Amino acid sequence: MSNILEITALTKNFGGLTAVSSLDLHIAEGEIMALIGPNGAGKSTVFNLVAGVYAPTEGTIRFKGEAISGRKPWDLCKMGLARTFQIVKPFATKTVLYNVMVGAFLHSGTTHKAREKAEEVIATLGLGDLRDRLAGSLTIADRKRLEIGKALATGPELLLLDEVMAGLRPTEVDDMIAIIKGLRDRGVTVFVIEHIMRAVMALSDRVAVLQFGQKIAEGTPEEVTRDENVIKAYLGG
Ligand code: ADP
Ligand code: MG
């Protein structure tokens, strides 16, 4: 299986702070990979680097074999790399359908095509009953689903999900786990940042653990949760 994403010696400094330090990480096509670690470990910065929000200080990022370091989010999205944000910001005064169509326009030349794509995504995510509701009136769980829908409508091959389970009830977490597994079954490679360990264990093929910008462990969920360095990091030792 080939790697859809290859991160090599990636470093990001903010002034004197090294948020990400010499990170090596790869994701194989079709995998669900999780990035975990304490608050401030550098997880969102890794996503921002991969998604083109920040340019790396050093190192390279390859997507589908092509160096993408320094490319802009919009160009990456056209290449098939989409993300959700930790802070969810839909167009609150527009409908669910409208919000998803915004993403769908990327590959669909006409309103008709964009609408078709949006309807397909809405059905995939079980948002059908909410199609005509204003995004601002949705519950947190439905907003998170809409956020995934907006990203999914751009037709990604690699989807980055930043804490899409935060604030959800246990049954909503179960629904989200099923949704993400369903995306993978449809051929999307998924890279998640997630704090809810139950979800990490249920979802991930592999997990990488960051602490102070450095990768301290990598392996199956079972392997990393047994790892002494990981246990120490989470206990603050
Ligand atoms: P995580 O997502 O793991 O909680 P972040 O990647 O958000 O961690 O942050 C890693 C470190 O980088 C933190 O110390 C944070 O304060 C810092 N940081 C993140 N983004 C910026 C920025 N744009 N400017 C300055 N410092 C930043
Ligand atoms: Mg974060």
Image: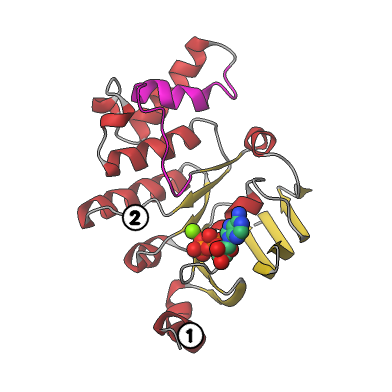
Asked if residue 103 is among those painted magenta in the image, a careful observer would answer yes
Residue 222 horizontal/vertical position (percent):
42, 77
Q: Which mark is residue 166?
A: 2
The residue carrying pointer 1 sits among few (fewer than 14), some (14 to 19) or many (20 or more) residues within 10 Å by Cα, namely: some
| Residue 96 appears in the picture as rendered | yes
**Near-viewer residue (16 or 25):** 16
Q: Is residue 80 above or below residue 213?
A: above
Looking at the rendered structure, the secondary structure element under dot 2 is loop
Q: Badge 1 is on which residue? A: 227
Q: Is residue 140 above or below residue 112?
A: below
User: Which residue shows up at 44% across the image and 72% down it?
Assistant: 221
Q: Are marks 2 and 1 in contact (CB under 8 Å)?
A: no
User: Which residue shows up at 47% across the image and 41% down it?
Assistant: 186
Lower position in the chain sequence, tag 2 or tag 1: 2
**Near-viewer residue (163 or 109):** 163
Residue 220 horizontal/vertical position (percent):
49, 73
The amino acid pointed to by label 2 is: Ala
**Which dot, 2 or 1, sits closer to the camera?**
2
Where the N terminus falls, by quadrant?
Answer: bottom right
Q: CA distance from mark 2 to mark 1?
A: 25 Å
User: Which residue shows up at 45% across the image and 50% down it?
Assistant: 86
Q: Which residues are magenta?
A: 85-108
The residue carrying pointer 2 sits among few (fewer than 14), some (14 to 19) or many (20 or more) residues within 10 Å by Cα, namely: some
